[in-house]
Every structure is written in structure tokens, then in C-alpha cells.
Amino acid sequence: MRLREELPEFSGDLEWMNGHVTKANLIGGVPILVHFWSISCPLCENIFGTISKWKKVYGDNFQLVGVHMPRSKDDINNKLIRQTADRLDMKNPICLDHKLIVTKKFQNRIVPSFYLFDKKGLLRHVQSGENGLKMLEKRLILLMKEQKK
């Protein structure tokens, strides 16, 4: 995806945990952080702790949507995904992208990856890996300030 592209639609036939979201109900209020992760990625678990802290600090000033992107057939196990989500206290909606439908729409290749959209649903920042989380948070803060204008 390129900067300023619109948030892709989440197909209606996808499986979800912790609720279901659509493009229509995400756009218009606050910034949206889409987080790609996988149960076979130890780095993803470490990084979710940082995201969880942001959610506690900034609350409803941004929306968090997880996309579980399997990296192997072993990752397509809803029970293990649920156990991991529960252990990490992931309360946000999580798309179970077993067929990589959402992953392809985002043109994503690695986990963890983050796509930050403004309240209009336009892509404003992309971040992959563990480096740059401070920059991601700075961009998030800027978008939260922007949305109040």
C-alpha cells in the first residue's frame, strides 16, 4: 500500500475474534491502527505489550484492529490464536486471515506490521518490525491531535 491510499475493505466472509469491523464503521471518528501479527512470531508478542500500553494511555482516541496472518499451516489454529489473544489480553477485534485475503489487500509480507490510517481512512504511516515503534507512536499522537480539529 502507498501513503494516502484508502483503508481496504474487510471481506464479509472472514472469521473474527472479539467482534467484527468493516471499513464503514471504522472511518470517520478516530485514527485506525491495523496490526498484523502471528502466533508463531515471538516478536509480535513482545510488541503487543507496547500497543497495549498505548491503548491504556490513549483509550478510545484510536481504534485497534488486529489481523492474524498465518506464516505456516501450523498458525491456522483458532484455539491457539484464542489462547494467545487471551494470554496477551487482546480485547480488540482480530481478523483471522487464514486465506491471506486481507494480507494481500494490504500488500503485507511480514509480521509484525502496522498500518496507521487517519480518521478519513487514508494511510498515513507504515511500520514493520520492532524498530520504529517510537516513530509510530509519534505519528499516532499527531493523528489523534488532527482528529480533534
Image (cartoon, rainbow, N blue to C red):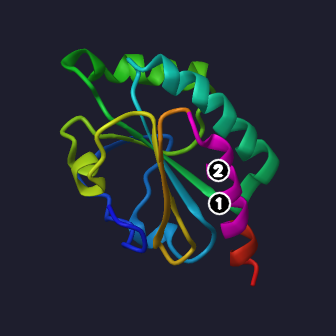
Q: What's the amino acid at mark 2?
A: Met
Asked if residue 138 lies in the magenta stretch, the reply is yes
Residue pictured at 38% horizontal, 73% vertical: 6
Residue pictured at 48% horizontal, 17% vertical: 42
- Residue segment shown in magenta: 131-143
Residue 120, x across and y down, in percent? 51, 78
Q: Is residue 51 left or right of residue 73?
A: right
Residue pictured at 71% horizontal, 45% vertical: 55
Q: What's the amino acid at mark 1?
A: Arg
User: Of helix, strand and loop, which mostly describes the magenta segment?
Assistant: helix
Name the image quarter holding the N terminus. Answer: bottom left
With respect to residue 83, does 32 lie above or below?
A: below
Q: CA distance from mark 1 to mark 2?
A: 6 Å
Residue to which mark 2 is pinned: 135
Q: Secondary structure at mark 1?
A: helix
Residue 88 got which mark?
none
Q: Nearer the viewer, residue 33 or 65?
A: 33
Residue 139 got which mark?
1
| Tally of numbered discs | 2
Say whether marks 1 and 2 touch (CB < 8 Å). yes
Asked if residue 121 lies in the magenta stretch, the reply is no
Q: Nearer the viewer, residue 130 or 94?
A: 130
Residue pictured at 60% horizontal, 23% vertical: 46
Residue 88, x across and y down, in percent? 60, 24
Location of residue 68 by image quarter? top left
Please tell me how crowded label 2 is: few (under 14), some (14-19), or many (20+) other residues with Cα within 10 Å.
few
Name the image quarter holding the C terminus. Answer: bottom right
Residue 95, x across and y down, in percent? 38, 43
With respect to residue 94, does 104 lie above or below?
A: below
Q: Residue furthest bottom?
A: 149
Q: Is residue 121 left or right of residue 146?
A: left
